[in-house]
């Protein structure tokens, strides 16, 4: 429960600090974390992927429609992942596939976001 509360605080802080997407197609961390907040229970406890989670994955994938946007999303995902206690890396890396979304780079905390195209 503390992990979920920490994530909620992180989401709120990111939304306040990062704001909405900016004009040069960068994605704000607030948008990333709010899109993926419904995925937290799946990423930490497993089970079925919630429909709201897949909707967020699809929304994020649509928003990340340029190299700068994908790189920004990658950095936000990595930052958020470091703040989720008990994150299952396998579930995180398989989330796009579980939601029927093709992401052109590996989802991992070890991904070099500068190489994402």
Image: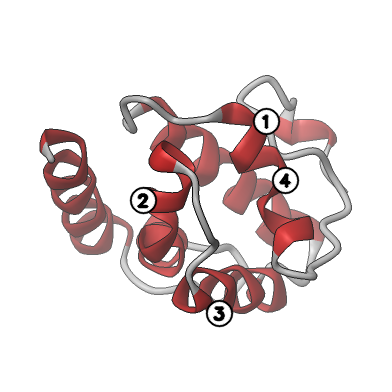
- Residue 60, position as x, y percentages in the image: 60, 70
Q: Residue at x 70, y 68 (%)?
A: 99
Q: Residue at label 1?
A: 108
* Left or right of residue 32, residue 99 in this image: right
Q: Which sits earlier in the primary sequence, circle 2 or circle 1?
A: 2
Callout 4–callout 1 Cβ contact below 8 Å = no
Q: Residue at label 3?
A: 55
Please rate how many residues cluster around mark 2, counting C-alpha atoms within 10 Å: few if below 14, some from 14 to 19, many from 20: some
Q: In the rendering, which numbered label is found on residue 94?
A: 4
Q: Which sits earlier in the primary sequence, circle 4 or circle 1?
A: 4
> Between tags 4 and 1, which lies in front?
4
Callout 3–callout 2 Cβ contact below 8 Å = no
Q: Residue at x 12, y 45 (%)?
A: 5
Q: In the rendering, which numbered label is found on residue 41?
A: 2
Q: Secondary structure at mark 1?
A: loop
* Left or right of residue 47, residue 89 in this image: right
**Spatial distance from mark 3 to mark 1, Cα to Cα?**
20 Å
Q: Secondary structure at mark 4?
A: helix
Q: Which sits earlier in the primary sequence, circle 4 or circle 2?
A: 2
**Spatial distance from mark 3 to mark 2, Cα to Cα?**
15 Å
Q: Residue at x 84, y 44 (%)?
A: 105
């Amino acid at each position: 429960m503390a992990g979920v509360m920490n994530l909620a605080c992180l989401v709120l802080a990111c939304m306040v600090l990062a704001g909405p997407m900016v004009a040069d197609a960068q994605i704000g961390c607030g948008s990333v974390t709010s899109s993926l907040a419904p995925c937290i229970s799946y990423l930490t406890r497993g089970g079925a992927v919630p429909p709201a989670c897949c909707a967020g994955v699809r929304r994020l994938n649509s928003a990340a429609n340029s190299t700068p946007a994908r790189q920004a999303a990658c950095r936000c995902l990595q930052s958020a992942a470091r703040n989720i206690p008990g994150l299952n890396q396998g579930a995180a890396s398989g989330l796009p596939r579980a939601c029927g979304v093709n992401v052109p780079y590996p989802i991992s905390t070890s991904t070099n976001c500068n190489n994402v195209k």
